Structure formats: structure tokens, C-alpha cells
Amino acid sequence: MFRTPKPYNLNDMSHDAAMDMLRKVLDAGVNVTDVIIDTVGIPEAYLTKLYRAFDSGITFRVEKKADANHKVVSAASIAAKVARDEIAANWVFAEKAYEPAEGTGVEWASGYPSDPKCKKWVEANLQDKVFCYPDVIRFSWKPIKDACLERGYPVKFEADDEEEDMMGEGLVSISDVFGGPKKKRARMGGNKVTRGMQYADIV
């Protein structure tokens, strides 16, 4: 979601995943004539995107609450949630030193802010003042942003004003973490640090 220069948002991720899946089905020789999709975002815009992507005589229906209105979509939704829960329950953290807080494990549950297990996990597992959470966490999510701002160290993001320097050096200064004069404006937001410290925001 923090791609530059253009962020890759959750709606686009969902659209691309659905279209990639359909392409694989078509490549396997399946005769697909009708596709019903539970919308992500505006149904009309999603429908237009699908018809532009596929010139194969498929009839698309993109609807709100399609999982409640069509049994086949309900079944697909259940299959997806079971797969998601299995992946989450068996997650192997990229950060080898990271250990979930005692009693929380990977019980992050649904990932929604109203979920008590999810809230408990977020509260218990900010274990680094700079990076805050492991990289599996969605740092653009407001509860994560708030936790990072309240309990983490501030990191100065200078890419807006120093993009040329960043591209040349492959680094973004985080000297403000350790103190130092303010040189340029900082942009506030959720933490994300990627390879070579090419992207840093607020932690």
C-alpha cells in the first residue's frame, strides 16, 4: 500500500487478485460464461474494469452483498475465510527475533478494530520503538497508526522534499529519531520501512 509514486490500495489488490484467479481458470481451459462478484468499491467501476480486462464473452455481475444473495458466492466467501484463517494461524514471521506477547500468539482474529482478540493483539505486540510491529501488519490502518504515534519513536519522512536525494543515495534520513535540528517539514502517517530504508514514515 506504500508503493511510490502511486500507492497500491486494498480495492485494487482485491480487483487484481480476482482477475488473476479468473485468468488462471480460463488458461486451464474452463469454459466460463458467468461471473458473480461481491463488490469491493463502487460496483459500476469494478464492472467496467472487468469488461475492459476480459474480451471472452463472459457476463459479469458485480453486486453489493453478493455473498448474501447468491449461494455460490457464499460458498466462495467461506472457502476464502477458511484459507485466510489457516494462513494467519500458521504465520511464520519474517522477523526471526519477533515473538508474539505471551498469551496472544497469532490470535489476531479477524483483523477488524471491533474484534476483542484483534485489539488485544495490537495492544500487546508493539515490541519495537522504531519499527513497532512485524511487517505482516497493515501500517496504514488507523489503530496501528495511532499505536505507533503514541508508543513508538517519531521518524522523519523526507521523501516528499528530498526524493532526488533518496533515489541517489538509496536512503532516507531518520536522524530525528535520535535528535537533531529540523530541516524540512515532516509528513505524518503510518510506519513503513522497506528495503534499504527507502521508505520511512511515522513509527
Image (spheres, rainbow, N blue to C red):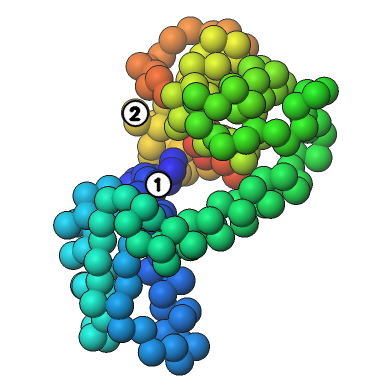
Q: Nearer the viewer, residue 168 or 85?
A: 85
Name the residue carrying label 1: 10
- 189 in relation to 134, above or below: above
Quarter of the image with the C terminus is: top right
Camera sees residue 148: yes
Percent position of residue 33, x then y: 30, 83
Percent position of residue 124, x then y: 70, 19
- Three-letter amino acid code of the residue under disc 2: Asp
Residue drawn at x 35%, y 16% is 185
Quarter of the image with the N terminus is: top left
Camera sees residue 122: no
Percent position of residue 127, x then y: 72, 21
Q: Nearer the viewer, residue 67 or 94?
A: 67
Name the residue carrying label 2: 161
Q: Nearer the viewer, residue 132 or 55?
A: 55
Mark 1 or mark 2: whose residue is earlier in sequence: 1
Residue drawn at x 58%, y 8% is 179
| Left or right, residue 134 beside residue 18 | right
Residue 22, located in which quarter of the rendered image? bottom left
Query: SS at mark 1?
Result: helix
Q: Nearer the viewer, residue 197 or 28?
A: 28
Residue drawn at x 55%, y 35% is 111
Query: SS at mark 2?
Result: loop
Cα distance between the residues tagged 1 and 2: 27 Å
Residue drawn at x 48%, y 7% is 181
